[in-house]
Image (spheres, rainbow, N blue to C red):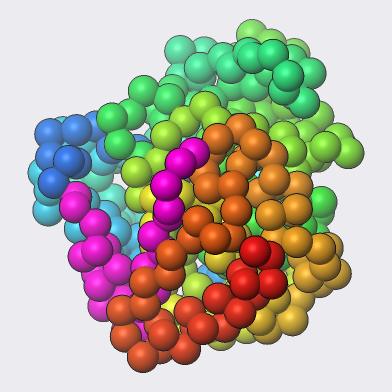
Amino acid sequence: MTGNAEIFLAGAQDRKDGVERVLAGFDLSGFSGMSVALKANYNSADPFPASTHIDTLDSICSTILEQKPARLTLAERSGMGNTKAVLDEMGVTALARDRGFLVTVLDDVDRNGWYEVQAPGLYWSRGFFLATVFARADRVVQTCCLKTHRYGGHFTMSLKNSVGLVAKRVPGLNYDFMNELHNSPRQRAMIAEINKFYRTDLIVMDAVEGFSSGGPDQGKLIRPGVIIAGTDRVAIDAVGVALLRSFGTVPDVMNGGIFEQEQIARAAELGVGVASADRITLVPLDKAGEATAQKIQQQLDMNR
């Protein structure tokens, strides 16, 4: 991928205000009349920062709906709980009803709801299946959290959030794709590969709080106090890793070059996003954003 990736940062004493201000940095007129798919972070029913905060989701959905898309669909597959129950408990189902967007539980879709991905050179031994709602959407929005991941991912931000739009099992196939992923020594490269096969047009990372160790459902709490947004998944994750490093984090995330992290390196190799730290431009929108941007920039500068 050529060019620079702009990453916007805003303080978030008021979460909704912070989300609205970072989204103001993007021209969203292209969402008008389009089918929009939304991937949030509802792997479990654990509270933020394990899962997307309902206020963040509300602000994002309200902003998109103002553009009058043909439809807005939140689709999810939870890895640590029953998806429908998770979405009900976290208030997503009620919010969708109130705001007028659709919710798709990916566990319940039939074979037509999955798009088969086969390509040479993948670490997935049998390829994988991507939710059709994302594969065919005109626009894709993602909102993720700032977390480490104790089960082999090392960190879970934008790139790893994509695992929830891949099938665990597909009707008619006797195969557990998530079992392959979680038992592979190349798990992090496989996570990156998912991202090659669907677009993103907007990514919002809620870093009001995060986990600097543990994760994805619980961990050591940190409070960066910012909302981060961009269009480049690699840049978002590189910024997230830099932010975790500024607080001190687990050795797997702390050590080595940021662009040597396997998720980031494989995604950059595949052209998912920028290939180096010097391609990231931080755009702080207020004093809190400026302070956080300085910390992030210090970490990125070590990787130039």
Q: Nearer the viewer, residue 154 or 260?
A: 260
Q: Nearer the viewer, residue 80 or 165?
A: 165
Give the image quarter of residue 218: bottom right
* Up-down relation of residue 294 to residue 186 (above or below): below
Name the quadrant of the C terminus. Answer: bottom right
* Up-down relation of residue 154 to residue 117 (above or below): below
Magenta segment: 1-28
Counting from the top left corner in percent of width and height, residue 203 is at 41, 54
The residue drawn where x is 65% and y is 21% is: 128
Tell whether position 123 is magenta: no
The residue drawn where x is 66% and y is 81% is: 246
Q: Nearer the viewer, residue 236 or 81?
A: 236
Counting from the top left corner in percent of width and height, residue 267 is at 62, 40
Compared across the picture, whether 200 is left or right of 178 comes to left
Compared across the picture, whether 191 is left or right of 16 comes to right
* Up-down relation of residue 170 to residue 269 (above or below): above
Find the residue positioned furthest to the top: 172
The residue drawn where x is 81% and y is 29% is: 180
Tell whether position 10 is magenta: yes
Give the image quarter of residue 147: bottom right
